[in-house]
Image (cartoon, helix red, strand yellow):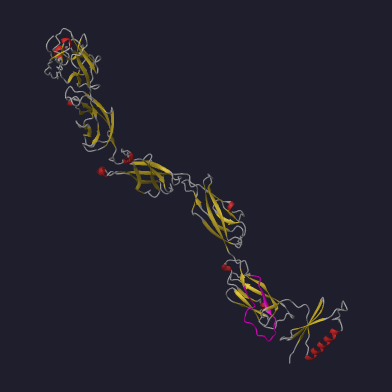
Amino acid sequence: MKENYCLQAALVCLGMLCHSQAFASEWRGHLRPSFHGHHEKGKEGQVLQRSKRGWVWNQFFVIEEYTGPDPVLVGRLHSDIDSGDGNIKYILSGEGAGTIFVIDDKSGNIHATKKLDREERAQYTLMAQAVDRDTNRPLEPPSEFIVKVQDINDNPPEFLHETYHANVPERSNVGTSVIQVTASDADDPTYGNSAKLVYSILEGQPYFSVEAQTGIIRTALPNMDREAKEEYHVVIQAKDMGGHMGGLSGTTKVTITLTDVNDNPPKFPQSVYQMSVSEANVPGEEVGRVKAKDPDIGENGLVTYSIVDGDGMELFEITTDYETQEGVIKLKKPVDFETKRAYSLKVEATNMHIDQKFISNGPFKDTVTVKIAVEDADEPPMFLAPSYIHEVQENAAAGTVVGRVHAKDPDAANSQIRYSIDRHTDLDRFFTINPEDGFIKTTKPLDREETAWLNITVFAAEIHNRHQEAKVPVAIRVLDVNDNAPKFAAPYEGFICESDQTKPLSNQPIVTISADDKDDTANGPRFIFSLPPEIIHNPNFTVRDNRDNTAGVYARRGGFSRQKQDLYLLPIVISDGGIPPMSSTNTLTIKVCGCDVNGALLSCNAEAYILNAGLSTGALIAILACIVILLGKGLPKLNGIPSPREDMRLRFCLLGLYKLPFLYVVVTNNPATLMIRFPIKLA
């Protein structure tokens, strides 16, 4: 047995051992001086050895994606105690040992049996050990090492999205940022330039550019017009290896849309529009439409219309249809073919929203001429007046002309007209109309006091087309004639107190009267009150006209007595102020009544039976004495009236002895009553 030994490891270049297509691997292990053992006495005199580690290394490298026909030699394990007789056995364990990495247990050569991909796994950790082939006794402790997969540029750049969409306003300044696109590379960014990307534009010039380092796309041309071209397709490339030849690349598509700005004014496609309207059309009906074209869209293309000039501004109006962006011309007032047959309008179209940045492109409006022809239509007759007022005197004979209505056909044909009265407005048939000339006449006398106004409707229709019909209201005023005499305004009644001749007359009227007249005021007041000529000198009463349509009735004398006459009927003549004047005689009733000393009425009833006798003082004393005697002898016969019962007593009542010039004696024999009045002359 040798006195000592040392285990060494070496990584043999793949270029010396492998096929010419293999890549050379640089050895990065570090050989160190082997550890020399020293002798120890064991059992039975056997000498044992303590070995020191004879190798130390950190890592091996293998290039990824090798596709040669033979396994790739990664490295070689070798010990200086290996004499080549096959007693040493090399063992490999750890990640991928036996599947990806295999070792030749005799030579110590390590091979990779499969193609490696750094992007799947970047390194493997393995354990190496040398053992005795026969006993498997470790000759050295196991040592750990790493096999790193060395990156090659095998992954092209990839964008986050296959396609991008971006918007930028039209007419943007050069250099305006549109969008940033980003790509990534799966290769190792720390090794070489495999993951160093550079952006470039393949399609889309000269409109757009891209920043090589950031991927920001910017506008490259000024005044790009959406109306000329709205959408652009740009292809951006990302290339690794810093963009140098041999680098891998990836692309993406970017769709860039120019958004609209208000950079175009509205424009009418023609200078003149021709339209027509029938004179039969009613206000509010559509006449026609105009449309100014604006290539802008959205609110930038909104247009409003107005009439700014023309001889039809008062007859036509225009509104905006915001769904179709058209100007709708409508009839504002009726038109008449016979009056004017054509009109001209100047219509203006204006943008509703103006961008001040593009105001220099203006003015953002346009004008157009609209010519409107008026078409003739078969119109109904037209009355010369919207209404008529006629007058007729009351009591006029049937057939009296009230007035005339006149209508004509406004059309050029000037058809003949026929007139008629709407009988729903003349149920009593007071009037008739001449169908040819429109003269209205009465059919019977009219009474103003019954109806002062009569309203009828007259129709006018074309002879050859009765459907073309017009109507007009006719008001007929019945003029007053003085055909009603004035009368008492109320059923008047007067009262006068009975009195003696010596009492002075009162200055107060017995009654004040007024009158009423059914005729108009022109034939009514002022009223004149008087007594009939035959009693103008009536001794009892007189009438005084107050000249205010009233009159007072006065007594001409005193000494009225109910015993002589308790009721007077006084005729009064009332005349009106009409031409000729009308008058009537009205009777006023005047009653004679009993009154107290203050003139207040006590009774206006007539006496049941009155005897009037004039007695002296001596006669009065004799009568009283006789009455006393009669009171003691039973019931006498009065004026030949027998007593119905013998025991019936005669009752006397003496009245009015105080301050009255008469003595009233009442003899009562129920049911008969006798009252005797005696005048008393006091000394």
Foreground residue among 373 and 48: 48
Q: Residue furthest bottom?
A: 683
| Highlighted range, magenta | 490-513
Image x and y of residue 329, in percent = 39, 44
Q: Is residue 495 visible?
A: yes
Q: Quadrant of the N terminus?
A: top left
Q: Position of residue 51 (x, y in %)?
A: 15, 16
Viewer-side residue, 389 vs 32: 32
**Residue 17, position in %: x, y?**
15, 12
Image quadrant containing the C terminus: bottom right
Q: Residue furthest top?
A: 85
Between 472 and 5, the one nearer to me in the picture = 5
Residue furthest toward the front?
A: 44
> Is 2 located above or below residue 603 in the figure?
above
Q: Residue 662 vs residue 378: left or right? A: right
Total labels drawn: 0
Residue closest to the eye, 439 or 150: 150
Query: Quick check: 654 above or below 299?
Result: below
The chief SS type of the magenta part is: loop
Q: Position of residue 408 (x, y in %)?
A: 49, 50
669 displayed left or right of 414: right
Left-right relation of 263 to 84: right
- Residue 207 visible at all: no
Q: Quadrant of residue 68?
A: top left
User: Does the magenta segment cover residue 257?
Assistant: no
Q: Quadrant of residue 209?
A: top left
Direction from residue 466 to residue 63 in the image, left or right: left
Q: Is residue 497 magenta?
A: yes
